[in-house]
Amino acid sequence: MPIRRVLDGARNPAQLVVGAFVTLVAAGTALLRLPVATDGPGALAITDALFLATSAATVTGLSTVDISELSLVGELVVLGLIQVGGFGIMTIGAVAVLLTVRRVGLRQRMLARAEIGAVSLGDVRTLVVGIAKLTVVVEAAVAVVLLVRFAQRGDEAVGNPVYSALFHAVSSFNNAGISLYSDSLERFVGDPVLVVAITLSFVVGGLGFPVLVEVRHRWRPRGWSLHARITLFATAVLLVVGPVVVLALEWGNPGTLGSLATGEKLLAGWFQGTTPRTAGFSTVAIGEMHEPTLLFVSTLMFVGAGPASTSGGIKITTFAVLAFVIWAEVRGDRDVNVFRRRLSENVVRQAITVALLAVGLVIGAALALVTISDLTLTPALFEAASAFGTTGLSTGVTAELPTAGQMLLVVVMLAGRVGVVTFVTALALRTRTRAYRYPEEQPIIG
C-alpha cells in the first residue's frame, strides 16, 4: 500500500507516531524476553525487558540491567531497536512536517518547503531514501574510524573490534548512548580519536535531517533558512558553553576530572559538556559529579538538540526562540526579530506551550520519583530530565528504582521522544478556527 495512502488514513499524525513507537517497543520487549537474549539461565523480567526496549527504541540509553547480561542475540535486538527508532523518528518527524504543510495554502506550502530544504511535498519516498543514505554514510564513516582505532589499540578492553565499532557507530549517530561496556566509555577517557569521532557522530545526528539536507545543498550561510540558522547558531553556542561550564565546575573533583592529566581533563570536559545534548555516553563517573554540575547537565538534557533528529527534549530551536522572545521583551521591541526575520506569533506561542508542558512533565516526574522512592531531589530530577531528553545519563540509580518508578520513566521516555513533535504537529494541523474573537484585555504580568 502506498505510504501516502496509509498516512492519509490516519486520523491524526500523533496517532501514527505514538502507535509506531508502542508497536516497536512491544516487539522489542517480546524479543528481549526470549531466553536466548540473555547469557545466563532464564529470561529478563518483563519490567526489565520493557524498560530496555523502550530505552533502545526511543534512543535514550537508560537501563535497569547491565549490557553484559545480554547475549549476542540480545545485543543485536537492542542494536536493531536503536537503528529503527533513530531512523524511524527522523522519517516520521519529516513526514509529519509534510502532512502539516499539505493542510495550508500554496504560499505557505512553498515557504515551508524552503524551510525544510526544498523537499518535494509529495515525494515521501525521496525523503525516506535521503535519510537512509545519510544514515548509512555517517554510520559507516564513524564505524571505519572506530575500527581502525580499536585495531590500533589491540587491548582486551575493546573486545571484538569490528562488532564494537559498528555498535557504537550506530548508537552514537542515533544519540542512543548505549555502550557494550558496563562503564560506558570511561575506559577511553584519554583517547582523542575515539572521543572526537563519537562526539562528531552524535552532534551530526542531533542537528536534524532538515538542517543536514539544506546545508548539503546550500553551503553558503546566506542561503540557509531561518530554521537552519537558528539550529546551527544555538548548537555552536551550547557546544562552547557546555564544556566550559563542566570544566569549570569539575576541574578539581577527584571523582571525575580531578585525577586526570591536563590534556585528559580538557578532552573529558569537552565530551561531558556535549554528550548531555541527548547522546548519553560518558567518559567519567556521572554519579561523582558535584550537584551544581548535575543541575547544569540536567538543563542541557532538557533542551536537547535539533527538531526532526534523533534527539529528545524541548529541542534547541524552542530554547532559542524563548531566548529571543526574552531578549525582545527586555529591549521593548514590538516584534521578535531573528537574523532579519520576524517570528510569527504562532511560533512564539507554540514554543512557550512546549516549554511549559515539558517543565510540568519533568518536575511532575521528579516529584513522583522522590515520593515513591528513596531518591533525593537532585538524582530524581536528573533521572527525569535524562528520560525526557532521551539522553540516558544516570547517577546510577535507575536499577534501584521501584517498579512504579521505572514504569514512570518508560512513559517519560516515550513522551520525550514523541511528545513535543506530536503536540506541535497537532497545533499546526488544526483545521477549524473560531469565526469570532473575544474582546481583548490585558492582565498585569510580572
Image: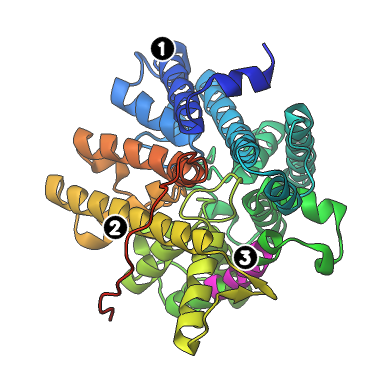
Mark 1 or mark 3: name the one nearer the start of the chain.
1
Disc nearer the start of the sequence (2/1): 1
The residue under label 3 is: 235
Q: Work out which quarter of the rendered image holds the C terminus and state it.
A: bottom left
**Residue receiving disc 2:** 381
In the image, residue 98 lies at what x, y percent? 65, 38
Residue 60 in view (yes/no): no
Q: Main secondary structure of the magenta part?
A: helix
Q: Quadrant of the N terminus?
A: top right
Q: Check the image and report above or below for 241 versus 155.
A: below
The span shown in magenta is 231-242
Which of 179/356 is in front? Answer: 356
* Left-right relation of 141 to 228: right
Question: What's the distance in space between the residues labelled 1 and 3, CA to CA?
Answer: 43 Å
Q: Is residue 393 left or right of residue 42?
A: right
Report which residue position mark 1 lands on.
35
Q: Residue at x 56, y 32 (%)?
A: 85
